Image (cartoon, rainbow, N blue to C red):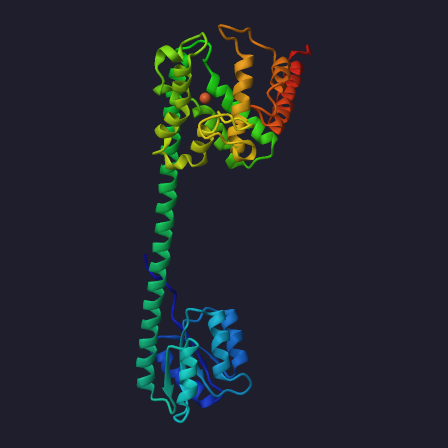
Amino acid sequence: MSLSEGPVTLLVVDDEEAIRNAVRKYLVQQGYEVAVAATGEQALEVLRRRKVTGILLDVNLPGTNGIDLVPQIMELEPTVALLMLTAVNDATSAALCMQRGALDYLLKPIDLTHLGRAIARALERRHTLLEGQQMHQWLKEEVALRVAERRVEQATQERISVATLEALVNALEAKDPYLRGHSARVADLSASVAAHLQRSDEEIEAVRTAGRLHDIGKIGIREEILNKHGPLSDEEYEHVKQHVLVGCQILAPLAHLGDVIGLIRSHHERWDGSGYPDRLAAGAIPLGARTIGAVEIYDALTTARPYQEKMPPEEAIDRMRELVGTAIDPSMHEALEAVVSRRQALVFLDDVPR
Ligand SMILES: [Fe+2]
C-alpha cells in the first residue's frame, strides 16, 4: 500500500499581484509546480481543471472571500492541504477556516522561510491523513473480503450438512421399497405447491429442505415398528409419533436451518387441531408444514403400499377431498390440485406423439 502521487502542485490565491509573484517565485525555487489565482472564482476554475496538492488562500479576497471559499474548495478537492493567509488582526477568520477544513494559517506579511516550513508541514500532515484514510479503506475491504469468504465457507458447510442428512434419510428409505424416494418426492412437490402459492424464494427453499428431512426422526423409531406393514397398536403409534420430535432434536444444532425445523415439527398437525405434537389448528400451523402434511398424504396415496394399490393422481386428489377441513387445509388442497393437474397436463403433452 503506498501513496504514489505526481509532482506537487500548489495554488496561490491572493488578489495582490506582488504577493502572488513573490510567493510563486519562491515556491518554484523550492521545486513545486505553482498555479496562481487572483480571485476565489479563478481558484475554483483552476481546481476544476487540474489536480492541486496544496493551496495558499488569502482570507480577504474580492468577491467570494476566503472563508466562504473553504467549503467549496474542500468539496472539489477533499484531500487538499489548505493554508490560510491572514492579516494580523484577523485570527477569528483563520480559526473559522480551520474549523471548515484548512490545516494551518500564516500571518501577513509573509516570511518566505516560515512559509516554506508551513507548506512542508501541511503537506506532511495531508500525507499522513491520506495514509490513514487509505489504511482505513484497505482494512474495510479486507474485512469485507474475509466476511464474504466466511459466508461462502459457511454456505458450503451448511449445504454439506443438509446433504449428509439427506443421505441418511435416503439410506433409511432405501430399506423399505414402499418408502424409497418418498422424501425427495415430497420435497419436490411441496416446493411446487409453495411456488404456486407465491411464497418467497426463501420460503420455497425452506419447504423443500423440510420436505427432504421431514422424516429424519424415523432414525429413532424401532425398526420392527417402522417396517411393520399391518396396523399399529396404540403404544406403537405413540412411539411413531415421536419421530417429529426426534427429528427436531437431531436438527436443533444446525442453526442455519431456521424455520425448517419448525416445519418438520408441525408436519403432522391437522387443520382441525387433532394432529401432533402440539395440536395446533388451522392458521396456527406453519404454512410450509401444512404443505408438507398435505403432500405427504398425496404421496402415500399415489405410491404402492403392501395394503394398497397405487392410486392415479386425480383419484388421490379426489380421495383427499374427504380430508379437507379435518386433516387438510382447504386452500392447500386447492393448490395441490392445481399443481397436480398442471403436472398431469405436462405428462399428457409428453405422451402425445409428434
Ligand atoms: Fe412424518
Residue at the limit of the structure toward the bottom, as seen here: 89
The image quadrant where one finds ligand 1 is: top left
Image coordinates for residue 52, horizontal then vertical, percent: 44, 71
Splitting the image into 4 quarters, where does residue 136 fall? bottom left
Query: Can you give x and y, in whole percent of width and height, for residue 146 in the image?
Result: 35, 46
Q: Residue at x 46, y 72 (%)?
A: 74
Describe residue 286's horizontal placement relative to residue 247 as left or right: right
Work out whether residue 188 or residue 28 is closer to the camera in this orientation and state it.
188
Task: In this rendered view, identify the residue nearer to me: 39 or 240.
Answer: 240
Residue displayed at 57% across by 26% down: 192
Q: In this view, which residue lies farthest toward the front?
A: 234
- Quarter-wise, where is residue 57 in the image? bottom left
* Above or below, comparing residue 350 to residue 201 in the picture: above
State the quadrant of the N terminus. Answer: bottom left
* Residue 314, percent from left and from top: 64, 15
**Residue in the image at 37% along x and 47% along y:** 145
Q: Is residue 276 left or right of residue 103?
A: right
Labels in figure, total:
0
Image quarter hosting the C terminus: top right
279, above or below 138, in the image: above
